[in-house]
Image (cartoon, rainbow, N blue to C red):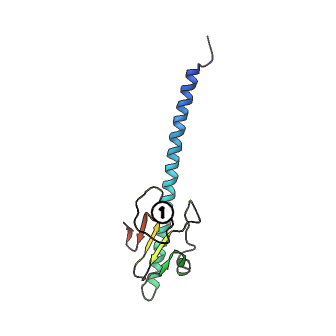
């Protein structure tokens, strides 16, 4: 009686392992994209809450006017530091408020390709945007 495997048996097992590893790698990549997108949404909600606190304490009931770079000064005391993208820390989220009565916060999510608005300060184009009343289309 032989105690070794045939070449066909080894190739079948190697092919099955290869297919399983490919499936696992695709699932892992999808999962990490989803988790980074969830973090982006959560961080924008934190900034939105800070903006609402700012407006409620402002004597004229306005939001800070400007772009994302202007928020770090305006929101001092309302949020620790402005968040950065979890994948690329050099990327900044988008913010735009021209008159202080409304605003748009934006981020580029990895899991969707639609666009919601064109914020000049949103590198790569925003496809997830928030305003004072929630998500914008």
Quarter location, residue 137: bottom left
Q: Left or right of 83: which side holds 99?
A: left
Q: Quadrant of residue 115?
A: bottom left
**Observer-nearest of 102 and 80:** 102
Identify whether 96 is placed above or below 61. Answer: above
Q: Secondary structure at mark 1?
A: loop
Q: Quadrant of the N terminus?
A: top right
Placement of 33 over or under 9, stated as above or below: below
How far across and down, in percent of the image, does residue 65 sit? Answer: 47, 82
Q: Residue at coordinates 55% horizontally, 21% vertically from top-left? A: 8
Which residue bears the numbered disc 1? 108
x, y (%) of residue 131? 40, 72
Question: As rendered, which of 120 and 34 lies closer to the eye?
Answer: 120
Residue at 62% from the left image edge and 18% from the top image edge: 4
Nearest the viewer among 97 and 118 is 118
Residue 87, percent from left and from top: 56, 59
Question: Residue 58, position in %: x, y?
Answer: 46, 86
Count the numbered circles shown: 1
Residue at the farthest bottom position: 59
Q: How crowded is the residue under tag 1: few (<14 C-alpha within 10 Å), some, or many (20+)?
A: many
Residue at the far right: name it. Answer: 3
Q: Is residue 97 left or right of residue 69?
A: left
Which residue occupies 51% across, 68% down? 93
């Amino acid at each position: 009686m032989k105690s070794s495997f045939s070449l066909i048996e080894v190739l079948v097992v190697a092919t099955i392992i290869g297919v399983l590893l490919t499936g696992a790698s695709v699932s892992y990549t999808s999962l990490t994209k989803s988790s980074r997108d969830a973090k982006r949404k959560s961080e924008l909600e934190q900034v939105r809450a800070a903006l609402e606190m700012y407006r409620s304490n402002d004597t004229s009931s306005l939001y800070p006017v400007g772009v994302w770079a202007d928020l770090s000064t305006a929101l001092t005391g309302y949020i620790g530091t402005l968040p950065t993208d979890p994948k690329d820390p050099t990327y900044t989220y988008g913010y735009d408020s021209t008159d202080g009565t409304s605003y748009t916060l934006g981020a580029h999510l990895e899991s969707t390709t639609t666009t919601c608005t064109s914020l000049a300060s949103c590198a790569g184009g925003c496809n997830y945007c928030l305003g004072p009343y929630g998500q914008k289309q």
